[in-house]
Image (cartoon, rainbow, N blue to C red):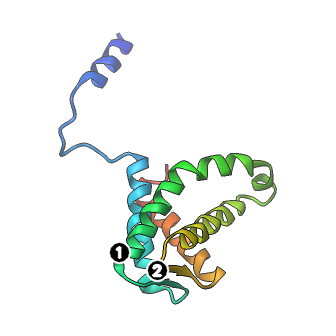
Amino acid sequence: MKREKQKEKKRQKVSPRDAKPSGVAITFLCCVLGVPTCAKMLPGIVAADVMASLQAGVLLGVAYLLLRPGLKLLTLPIGCLTLGLTNFAIDVGLLYGCAYLIEGFSVESVISAIGTAMLINGISAIAGGFR
């Protein structure tokens, strides 16, 4: 009985008004919107124009979704020893990689890169409901 009710709940259609965005969409949007915000707020993140910061945000979002899980898996033993601080090193490295690939976008200091990583991760955690 109980399993049948659970299957029936899964079959029910969800209206677009009640639909919730997935974690992938939340992470991507946080990156796309977080990088231009940090470019305006933090002095060490420099973008020539809004388009360069949006391009960096899109590239960072794709890197967060494709590269970051594998890098976290590779650095898992070190991450356990440092209590997860290597995750910030991964995020900072991805941000520097975006700055290297996008013309007109640069990261001038490590402190600004850490602040950007913290802001993007914080917004993503709040928007995603601390999954």
User: Is tag 2's residue or tag 1's residue first in the polypeptide sequence?
Assistant: 1
Indicate the quadrant containing the N terminus: top left, top right, bottom left or bottom right: top left
Nearest to the observer: residue 66 or residue 20: 66
What's the amino acid at mark 1? Answer: Met
Label 1: how many residues lie within 10 Å, few (<14), some (14-19) or many (20+)?
Answer: few
Q: Residue at x 60, y 85 (%)?
A: 108
Q: Mark 2 points at which residue?
A: 104
Nearest to the observer: residue 6 or residue 53: 53
- Mark seen at residue 114: none
Residue located farthest toward the top when viewing the structure as drawn: 1
Q: What element carries label 1?
A: helix
Q: Residue at x 59, y 51 (%)?
A: 67
Left or right of residue 84, residue 55 in this image: left
Q: Residue at x 46, y 80 (%)?
A: 104
Q: Residue 24: horizontal and vertical position, in percent?
A: 43, 48
Label 2: how many residues lie within 10 Å, few (<14), some (14-19) or many (20+)?
Answer: some
Q: Name the residue under label 1.
A: 51
Q: Residue 84: horizontal and vertical position, in percent?
A: 70, 58
Q: What element carries label 2?
A: loop
Q: Residue at x 43, y 70 (%)?
A: 34
The picture quadrant where one finds residue 127 is bottom left
Left or right of residue 110, residue 121 in this image: left
What's the amino acid at mark 2? Answer: Gly
* Relative vertical location of residue 103 with respect to residue 123 in this rendering, above or below: below
Q: Residue 102: horizontal and vertical position, in percent?
A: 49, 71
Nearest to the observer: residue 88 or residue 51: 51
Number of marks in picture:
2
**Are circles 2 and 1 on residues that touch, CB within 8 Å?**
yes
* Relative vertical location of residue 111 with respect to residue 9 in this rendering, above or below: below
Q: Residue 76: horizontal and vertical position, in percent?
A: 74, 49
Q: How far apart are marks 2 and 1 (CA)?
A: 9 Å
